[in-house]
Image (cartoon, rainbow, N blue to C red):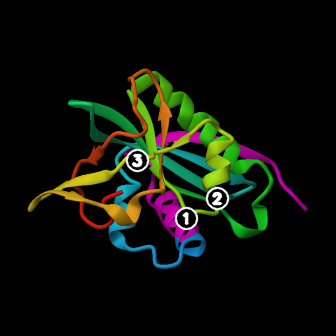
Amino acid sequence: MEGMTKLELLHTSALDAPTLIAARSLLDGAFDGLDEHDWNHALGGMHALVWEDDGLIGHASVVQRSLLHGGRALRAGYVEAVAVRGDRRSSGHATTMMNALETIIRDAYDLGALSASEAAGDFYAHRNWHRWKGRLHALTPQGTVRTEDDEGSVHVLPAGAPLDLTADLVADFRDGDLW
């Protein structure tokens, strides 16, 4: 039986140790091969947490990144670590979390961005996220490199900055997955 659900929006700095442990456990259960880099990518921004009774059943976060597009550095709200516990999927919890994060993105960033699996692509498309059609690159210690393997998986949510979805898009550097 479903319990009472509650959405919380908290910055990483406001998450206590038990909440961080619960979030990491939820993500470990949702993603095969979640590593320390993936976990660190989800930290440092705002978290949308869905609680049911005393348990965490959903997590998503938005962190700030810089994306280069059209000769400009854009402040991007980059969505990370979107997951709902397996037995609570298809209950609207991902929609609830994304509604909250998209409000933050529209209010604070030039655009939203995320990298999604093929299976999740339709979910984001229905939310007016657009698949990036241009080439993808990343800034690295070795210079700017093309990230062809990520092409087709990056989606953006326009939030004020003019975007040409067929142009090149360049991500700032981070350890682990670049997108």
| Residue bearing mark 1 | 22
Which residue: 47% across, 56% down? 152
The image quadrant where one finds the N terminus is: bottom right
| Residue bearing mark 3 | 12
Please give left or right for residue 164 compared with residue 178 in the image: right
Which residue: 54% across, 51% down? 60
Please give left or right for residue 141 compared with residue 154 in the image: left
Which residue: 33% across, 65% down? 177
Query: Which corner quadrant of the image does residue 97 belong to?
Result: top right
Q: x%, y% of residue 159?
A: 47, 25
Residue 56 badge: 2
The image quadrant where one finds the C terminus is: bottom left
Label pair 2/1, CB-CB below 8 angstroms: yes
> Label 1 is placed on what type of residue?
Ala
Circle 3 residues within 10 Å: few <14, some 14–19, many ≥20 = some
Q: Tell me the magenta residue range.
A: 1-27
Judged from the image, the secondary structure of the residue bearing numbered disc 1 is helix
> Label 3 is placed on what type of residue?
Thr
The residues bearing labels 3 and 1 have C-alpha atoms spaced at a distance of 13 Å
Circle 1 residues within 10 Å: few <14, some 14–19, many ≥20 = some
Query: Which corner quadrant of the image does residue 140 belong to?
Result: bottom left
| Extreme-left residue of the structure | 142
Which residue: 26% across, 53% down? 137
Please give left or right for residue 77 compared with residue 146 in the image: right
